[in-house]
Image (tube, rainbow, N blue to C red):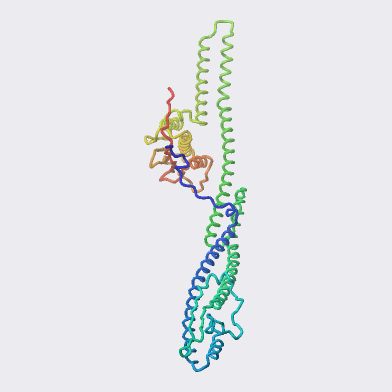
Amino acid sequence: MSSPGPADASHPATPAAPRFWTTWATRTRMIAVVLAIDAIAALVSIGIVVVNARSAVTVEMEASLATVEPLVSDTVGLAQAEAPGSLLRTLDLRFQALRHVRVGLFDAQGRSLATGPSVRRDRYAAPAWFAALIAPPVQRHELPIVVGTERIGTARITTEPRDEIDEIWGYATSLSLASLCLNLALLAALYVALGRVLAPLGRLADGLTQLERQDYAVRLAPSGSREVAVITDRFNRVAQALEEVRAANGRLNRQLLTAQDDERRRTALELHDEFGPCLFALEANAASVSRIAEGAGEPDRPRLAARAHDISAIVGQVQALNRDLLNRLRPHGLGQVPLPNCLDLLLSDFSRRHPETRFSGEFAALGQGYGDLVDLTVFRCIQESMTNAVRHGDARHVFAQAGEDDGRLRVTVTDDGAGVPPDHCIGFGLSGMRERVEALGGDFRLDTATPGAVVRISIPIDPERGEETVSATPA
């Protein structure tokens, strides 16, 4: 047996709605649903009316038979003194106008004795199909007409339900017309009400279209409906948030361009102020070596050795400047040695450049690495925090701590400097740290300590990152 494919493992797909239904407007769908409910209710009502009417007609016919048979018997008994022919004519005239039953009189030979005009109707209000649904089976009872001991004729009693059916038809027609008028009025009111209720959704769709066109200044007017008012409020908040994010992105882009220009200007100044004199000194010493070597006599070896020593010192200075410059652009050991070692080297570098400040750290709870982006973010945040502590806080002790805790990478940098002034404004360094951390889904906080300031950073650790491997470069 073949193994189930990806489609078999997934949940069964929900049957798609008919295409014509999906193209209808919401108001049209709701009106169609109400019409369908009305149609079902009408069918149920018709069924109930038919069942009840059939039962009512049957009961009425049975009651009419039960009433007419004793009436015929009593009438024959009271008219015993009359002549047979006169008796039959009296009975025929008396029973011509009865409802629900017809009484036919026949003589002893079976001939009909109807003498008056017939009261039987040929046309009825109820249509034939309605009468066929309701009419019970026709019942016939025959009563002998006896005078003395002689049978002079027969009274044939036949049920006639059409009169009762016409009454039921009239009642059903009136009820149907009243229901139709009521439903039409209800549908008209529902159509108007749905138009007013769904109008905010149309405005919401227009607003979403404007958001799609990046017009984040759009706002929706408040609605009277509580549910729609909640949606409108959320829409306005989203639009405002998008507008603020776009404005923040614009500011960050400008800051990024400014920071890039500042970095280029700073690099250019260092190349001019640091590398320029060193290169000039190298050129001067090289020219001096050339003049000594081209002299007529024996070369002055002590002077050559002095020039070689000067050139070596200048090359060392250039190498140190080059290392600092490259390390500022990107730490060269990051990704090649474990992250705690890189941070220890960073502390050592700060201690060398700022001997008046004590730098210490605790990084034993860190892993070897968390990926290039996370490692660089942690390194730059600690570097920028210590730079701010020395440059702006005049700190004498800076302590950095980093480690894993509950699935997050937590970094804390504390100093004993001047702290955060009340009129503090976020500069490029702090905004850069915040942006780096938030881009990784983390949190950044700058708080005032006693004394000094503390930077707290929390970055989620990707559970699927696996073990990061680093290779140490030879010394």
Q: Nearer the viewer, residue 361 or 70?
A: 70
Among the 4 quarters of the image, the one containing residue 355: top left
Tell me if residue 268 comes above or below residue 107 in the rendering. Answer: above
Q: Nearer the viewer, residue 314 or 255?
A: 255
Among the 4 quarters of the image, the one containing residue 235: bottom right
Image quarter hosting the N terminus: top left
Q: Position of residue 44 (x, y in %)?
A: 51, 67
**Residue extending furthest toward the bottom:** 81
Q: Position of residue 252 (x, y in %)?
A: 56, 42
Image quarter hosting the C terminus: top left
Q: Taking 358 as reference, is 427 left or right?
A: right
Q: Nearer the viewer, residue 456 or 194?
A: 194
The total of numbered circles placed on residues is 0
Q: Position of residue 381 (x, y in %)?
A: 47, 38
**Residue extending furthest toward the top:** 297
Query: Which residue is depicted at the point 59% across and 15% down?
Result: 287
Tell me if residue 343 comes above or below residue 424 in the rendering. Answer: above
Q: Nearer the viewer, residue 170 or 340?
A: 170
Tell me if residue 282 comes above or below residue 17 in the rendering. Answer: above
Q: Position of residue 227 (x, y in %)?
A: 52, 60
Among the 4 quarters of the image, the one containing residue 9: top left
Query: Which residue is depicted at the point 57% across and 9% down?
Result: 293
